[in-house]
Amino acid sequence: MDNLYLLIKYYQKKVNADEKLLVENWLSESGSNQKKYEQYIEIWNASNKVKALKNISYEAEWEQIKSKAKIKRISFKKTYGFWLRIAAVIALMLGSYWILQDKLFEQKYLMVQNDSRDELKVITLEDGTKVTLNYQANLYYPKRFKKKSREVKLEGNAFFSVAKNKEKPFSIETEMTLIEVLGTSFDVRAGQKKTAVTVATGKVRVSNKSNKNVFVELIPNEQAIHEGDEIQKNKVKGDNYFSWKTGTFRFKDHSLTEVMEILERRFHFNHHFENEDLKLRELTADLNGETLDDIIEIIQISCQVRINLKSNQLIISENE
């Protein structure tokens, strides 16, 4: 969890019930999360002390330290080493303070996370825009948008249905990409090294966050892939790009490899083919609202394969 503001709110006991549950679930996941939380809070407490450093009389403080430690004699070498360590701690705290200031600047943003494998989470923003979050997606958004813009941040996979407002453009910032729209609907998969944007309706501009001269504009059934410094635009068959949200799948002579990749985004499993030849078997089927168990049964009958689910992994083998 990188939402430092939320962790500080939790520490100060200012979170609501949903935020409290989110933090406590994260803390219970591992000991390393608990340790990271304690380190954040330690830095936070230290940073509050740093604010007052400019008002400290260092000579008076040193005399007080010597008095408390009952130091009668101390060599220059030891004094130098001591102050070097003190300077290093102060520098660390000052650096942490400014990092915290940057993080706290983001307190104007709320954060919502979908940690459910089985259910999508739908957020309605104050302008009427609806955002559907897939599993492990994080959305950062303000309670109130600015007067002339609507800005949010995304990590992971989400579908946006943006309310039209020509006076206030809507923008989504990912790790590496800036996405700008007026009113439209589209899918975003935002990773640390790659962002994919697929448009369902309207028009979208996708640009490199670090170089806005590198951009593409998309219309329905077009997709932008931003990886490295380049953005590629492709034509796509849009139906199944949005299936994770709609639950509707349209397969026409799709290979089993393609089928599994599409289903993974909805049901969040891994898959393994026991035989490479099985990847080339094809499926033609229209599915709407079926459970994963139902879909597995259809694939087994249609493609003459056997599929076993073990530890959230589908094992595809020859039907004997």
Image (cartoon, rainbow, N blue to C red):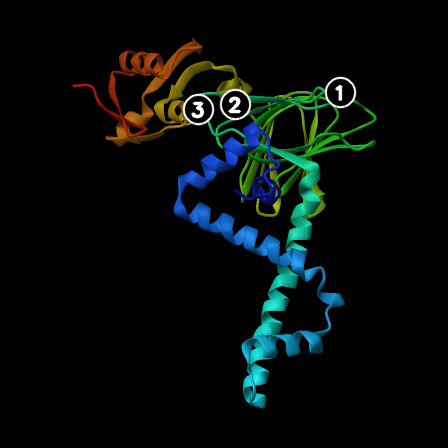
Q: Residue at x 71, y 65 (%)?
A: 53
Q: Residue at x 75, y 66 (%)?
A: 54
Give whichever of 280, 141 is nearer the camera: 141
- Marks 1 and 2: CB-CB under 8 Å? no
Q: Amino acid at mark 1?
A: Lys
Q: Earlier in the sequence, mark 1 or mark 2?
A: 1
Q: Label 1 to label 2, Cα distance in Å?
A: 23 Å
Residue at label 1?
164
Q: Is residue 145 visible?
A: yes
Which of the 4 image quarters holds residue 124?
Answer: top right
SS for callout 2: helix
Residue at label 2?
241
Q: Residue at x 62, y 62 (%)?
A: 93
Of circles 3 and 1, the one toward us is 1
Numbered disc total: 3
Q: Amino acid at mark 3?
A: Ile
Using the image, tell me which numbered label, if any, was put on residue 262. Answer: 3
SS for callout 3: helix
Give whichever of 237, 49 is nearer the camera: 49
Q: Earlier in the sequence, mark 3 or mark 1?
A: 1
Using the image, tell me which numbered label, if any, was put on residue 48. Answer: none
SS for callout 1: loop
Residue 267 left/right relative to 206:
left
Q: Label 3 to label 2, Cα distance in Å?
A: 8 Å
Q: Residues within 10 Å of mark 2 (few under 14, many from 20)?
A: many
Where does residue 292 sit, x and y in percent of width and height?
Answer: 36, 17
Where, quadrant-wise, is the C terminus in this rendering? top left
Which of the 4 image quarters holds residue 42?
Answer: bottom right
Residue 247 against residue 78 in the figure, above or below: above
Q: Amino acid at mark 2?
A: Tyr
Q: Residues within 10 Å of mark 1 (few under 14, many from 20)?
A: some
